[in-house]
Image: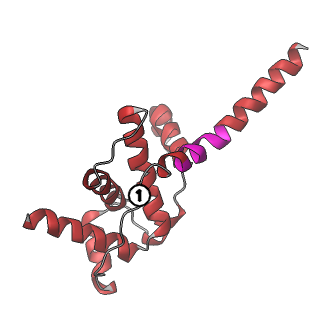
Amino acid sequence: MIKKLILSFILIAIFLVAIAPLAVYKLTLSNVDKPVRPTILISGDDLLEYWAKYDHVENIDDISNTTPYWIYKWLIVAIFEKQIKDRGFTIEINNISKMAGLIALNHLRESDFKPSTGGMLNWHMTSINLGIWIQRNWSAIEIASKHKEINITKVST
């Protein structure tokens, strides 16, 4: 009886760990409108220079591979950073685009987003997940162009 209870508990825990990031991703995105894509796109020639100046993701093609499950990689690095470094390993968690994150933050501020529940935790989770959504659904040119559009607007006002 105890073995079945423990096994059931373990299976439920594994299920929750597997489903939680995707559930939070879907839930937070259902509470916010998506940002409008940029109206003017920068040229392909300017993209690499602009990207290198404003973002830390080295391989532009990797941005669309980011999933809500990146949080587990981040947690592992955050918790075991010393042990990882002591063994001579490095784990890069730089596949989250700074520009996509700034677009998400700007959108939440401009749309006056106020989470109905969860307070600031919900606000931050929505921001992170909206940034991931932008990376998964927009091209690198669209992300860079929208970032440039936001920067021009902020400077000129």
**Disc 1 packing (10 Å; few <14; some 14–19; many ≥20):** few
Q: Which amino acid, mark 1?
A: Asp
Above or below for 44 versus 128: below
Apparent side of residue 123 relative to residue 23 in the rendered image (left or right): left
Q: Is residue 91 in view?
A: no
The residue lying at 34 percent from left, 85 percent from top is: 44
- Quadrant placement of the C terminus: bottom left
Apparent side of residue 14 relative to residue 149 in the rendered image (left or right): right
- Where residue 111 appears, as percent x and y from the top left, is 29, 54
Magenta stretch bounds: 17-26
Q: Which quadrant of the structure image shows residue 15?
A: top right
Q: Nearer the viewer, residue 65 or 16?
A: 16
- Where residue 154 appears, as percent x and y from the top left, is 14, 62
Above or below for 145 versus 79: below
- Where residue 81 appears, as percent x and y from the top left, is 45, 36
Q: Nearer the viewer, residue 87 or 131?
A: 131
The rendered magenta stretch, by its main secondary structure, is classed as helix
Q: Nearer the viewer, residue 98 or 156?
A: 156
Residue at the spot of label 1: 33
Above or below for 143 versus 83: below
- Quadrant placement of the N terminus: top right
Q: Which quadrant of the structure image shows residue 48?
A: bottom left
**Residue 139 forms part of the magenta stretch:** no
The residue lying at 38 percent from left, 49 percent from top is: 127
What residue occupies the far front of the structure in this picture?
116
What residue occupies the far top of the structure in this picture?
2
